[in-house]
Image (cartoon, rainbow, N blue to C red):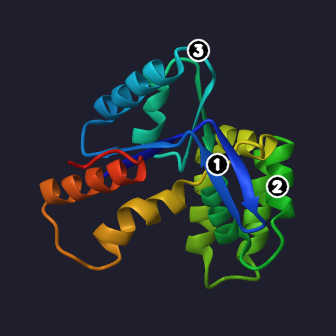
Amino acid sequence: MELATVYTDKVDVDSNRTELVEKHSFTGLETPEEFWIQIDSYLVDAYMGSSKVYIIGDGARWIKRGLDVLVNSEFILDRFHLFKYMIKVCGKRSRKEVFASLETNDKVRLKAYVEKMKEPYPHRPKQIVEGATYIENQWDYAQVSLLRPDIRSSTEAHVSHILSTRLISRLLGWSEKGAETIAKLRVLSDNNESIQ
């Protein structure tokens, strides 16, 4: 099930919390193209301009499909997933070498570091390779993510708040239609829209 949240800014409320400005969420089981067309219609109605649209996510194909639908859009890998896969490569060691590889656009340097990491951690080569492969596959988007720390995502928090809380965490059994209905009701509530 897809979930996307549109917002214009992210402001710090206190040291541990941020709030999205002009937030509006979408969810459903439509095809990726249909899903992004709904978002495009909302953007045209709500903002009537050609502002830059940043699509922030984990790099899944359905997310990147938004680039084909939304005019003037750019994909940026969300830092949550970038750091998650950096940890797979580095374990508890510093991520400086991975950062440096991305910042200098040096894939050879990353590959050398990955090989170096396999030596002291022979019990985790699969995780190291998985992390490195993800970073290599998302290379350009990971670089943008590091260069644009001002563009931040709350995707995982929204998935947890809107979908997981009701559909996954409580281990309830849902049909596909039932799950979509509950998700859409939760999005309506989150958007402060009437569910009548």
The numbered mark, 2 or 3, whose residue comes first in the sequence reads: 3
Q: Residue at x 60, y 58 (%)?
A: 81
Q: CA distance from mark 1 to mark 2?
A: 13 Å
Task: Quickly name the residue at label 1.
Answer: 136
Q: Secondary structure at mark 2?
A: helix
Secondary structure state at the residue bearing disc 1: helix
Q: Residue beneath label 2, please? A: 99
**Left or right of 85 on screen, residue 165:** left
Residue type, numbered disc 3: Ser
The image quarter in which residue 144 lies:
top right
Q: Nearer the viewer, mark 3 or mark 1?
A: 3
Could you tell whether 153 is left or right of 13 in the image? left
User: How busy is the neighbourhood of tag 1: few (under 14 within 10 Å), some, or many (20 plus)?
Assistant: some
User: Callout 3: helix, strand or loop?
Assistant: loop
Q: Is residue 191 above or below residue 55?
A: below
**x then y, percent, for residue 155:** 53, 54
Q: Mark 2 packing: few (<14 Cα in 10 Å), some, or many (20+)? A: some
User: Which of the two residues, 15 or 131, is positioned nearer the viewer here?
Assistant: 15
| Distance between the alpha carbons at the discs numbered 3 and 1 | 31 Å
